[in-house]
Image (cartoon, rainbow, N blue to C red):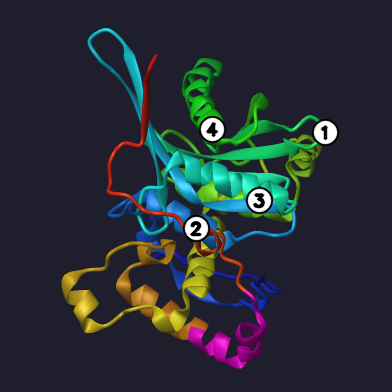
Amino acid sequence: MNIYTFPKNTIIDNLNMSGLKVKIDQLYAGGIGYGATASQLMSHGMETIGNNVRVYNLPFCIEGLNYKGLNNKYVVYEIVSSENLLVPEERIKDIIKQGIREGYTDFNLAIDYSGHASLAHMSIDKRNNKFNLMFFDSYFLSDEQIKTRYDDIKQIIEKISPIPMKNYRVYHLLHQGGIRSKGCGYYTVYTALLLKNKTAEKLINQFKDQCEYLYDQKDDPKIRTELVVRTMLHYGPKKVDTSFKVELYGIKKTCIFHMLDLNSMRKLKKSLEKKVTKQNSYFKNKEIKNAFRSYPYQGVTKTHKGHWEV
């Protein structure tokens, strides 16, 4: 039985989680997309992480793949929201453009490409009105694999950006483990949290200084469990449905906390409700800035939103 216990002085969203125990067996049944829509869960995870004065975590996910036809290779992609609706490219451009006007300098966007998740980080250089593009990948790839994967994704990012790109780099600061690891979706969202708390430059320098990964597979329980707790707090513990009807018909997995088994979810819901009740003033005074609802868009039916022939 895998149980993660939050260490002493663990604070999440101003709430003290010290000693909170969460049974996480089900979290290891598969990746973030096991029995769920990975893009939707990552989009909701990005929405949960939220923004600060510098960083804008876009609550969407680029879902794409490349495949070979008879004579050519094709890249197909779509942009998925936390409500599993498609978002037009132009709407993303408008959101980034508005964000730049409001003073944001860094934009993060989750990627689910050919079955593997990673994070795109756009850093705006206001001196020449261009952006540096960084990709953060928790799985070690060869130079050839990096070029094949990220040359494609770079073109997608360029299509949704309102300003031109200077260059792109790929970084491997977190390490999810070997070929059988299924943690890429969780590590992607967690990287967005790290980039909200520290600039990319500081994280990269920290990685260079300590000569080891910032987080690796030994930190898997912490990363997954913390995201489960954060997403349930953001959703609102009292709103989480753990009724007999849910148990009978199954849960539609739309948030990361749904990756727990039902019994564990019930226990966590009860624990968080107690903590929220004790610190109720936190929720009364907290202003939740939800980028997804700040910039409404017209959702469209599930279909491919972009493609090109290579």
Query: Mark 1 to mark 3: distance in Å?
Result: 17 Å
Res 212 visible: no
Asked whether 145 or 45 is in front, the reply is 45
Residue at image point 65% right, 28% down: 164
Q: Determine whether label 4 and label 1 are within 8 Å by CB.
A: no
Callout in the foreground (4, 2): 4
What x and y, as percent, mark residue 66? 35, 24
Does label 4 or label 2 sit earlier along the sequence? Answer: 2
Report the amino acid beneath label 2: Gly
Query: Mark 4 to mark 3: distance in Å?
Result: 16 Å
Callout in the foreground (1, 2): 1
Does label 2 or label 3 sit earlier along the sequence? Answer: 2
Q: Would you say 237 lies left or right of 136 here?
A: left
Q: Which residues are magenta?
A: 273-287
Q: Determine whether label 2 and label 3 are within 8 Å by CB.
A: no
Does label 4 or label 3 sit earlier along the sequence? Answer: 3
Query: Mark 1 to mark 2: distance in Å?
Result: 32 Å
Report the amino acid beneath label 3: Gly
- Residue bearing mark 3: 99
Does label 4 or label 1 sit earlier along the sequence? Answer: 1
Report the amino acid beneath label 4: Ile
Is residue 251 in the magenta section?
A: no
Q: Determine whether label 4 and label 2 are within 8 Å by CB.
A: no
Mark number for residue 157? 4
- Residue bearing mark 2: 45
Query: Mark 4 to mark 2: distance in Å?
Result: 20 Å
Outermost top residue: 71
Secondary structure of residue under mark 2: helix
Q: Residues within 10 Å of mark 2 (few under 14, many from 20)?
A: many
Asked whether 17 or 47 is in front, the reply is 47
Q: Would you say 106 lies left or right of 291 here?
A: right
